[in-house]
Image (cartoon, helix red, strand yellow):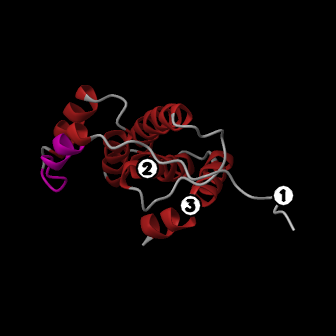
Amino acid sequence: MQDLMSQPPATLLPAEPDADAAMATVDLRSAEAVAGLKAVAARFPAYSAAWARLAEQALAAGDPVTAYAFARTGYHRGLDQLRRNGWRGYGPVPWSHQPNQGFLRSVNVLGLAADGIGEAEEAARCAQLLRDSDPAAGDALSG
């Protein structure tokens, strides 16, 4: 019997070694973390991981509006990359593939920031997208 409900193949974003190397130089525990992350985002504006980390830093600092803006940027830049790599709006985006993690982190923090500003419907959509992309992403990011 043929599986009519099969999913498309997993979408795997390409590695970005120069952006990864720049990100590795940022000490996320330092007072200069945000400035370092902004420098990475400015140099590599399509690199969702920098936007996601900026959003996480803003949310941790109690600024959900700024977190929302950074996360929304990372989310949209990630969507652009996913589409360029064959994603059609659904299907697996594995957490285990490191280059996908910036997009998935952006989706997660976008949902958290949306919840923080009272956008419950968007928070729910983000939570669903994260689960649909890869349930392991939600597990990794919540614990």
Foreground mark, 2 or 1, reads 1
Residue 66 placement (x, y as % from top left): 39, 37
Residue at horizontal 43%, vertical 68%?
140
- Give the labeled residue for mark 1: 4
Of the residues under marks 1 and 3, which one precedes in the sequence?
Answer: 1
Locate residue 33 relative to residue 117 in the image: left or right.
left
Q: What element carries label 2?
A: helix
Please tell me whether residue 22 is drawn above or below residue 134 in the rendered image.
Answer: above
Quarter of the view holding residue 20: top left
**Callout 1: 10 Å neighbours few (<14), some, many (20+)?**
few
Q: Do the residues labelled 3 and 2 touch (CB within 8 Å)?
A: yes
Q: What element carries label 3?
A: loop
Residue 101 in the magenta stretch? The answer is no
- Give the labeled residue for mark 3: 134
Residue 62 shows in the view = no
Q: Are marks 1 and 3 in contact (CB under 8 Å)?
A: no
**Mark number for residue 137?**
none
Specify the farthest residue to the bottom.
143
Residue 15 placement (x, y as % from top left): 33, 44
Residue 121 placement (x, y as % from top left): 69, 48
**Which residue is nearer to you in this view: 52 or 122?**
52
Specify the farthest residue to the front.
1
Residue at horizontal 74%, vertical 58%?
6
**Callout 3: 10 Å neighbours few (<14), some, many (20+)?**
some
Instruction: Give the spatial CA distance, label 2 vs label 1.
Output: 27 Å
Q: What stretch is highlighted in magenta?
A: 20-30
Locate residue 128 relative to residue 103 in the image: left or right.
right
Residue 106 shows in the view = yes
Q: In which quarter of the image is the N terminus?
A: bottom right
- Give the labeled residue for mark 2: 100
Foreground mark, 1 or 3, reads 1
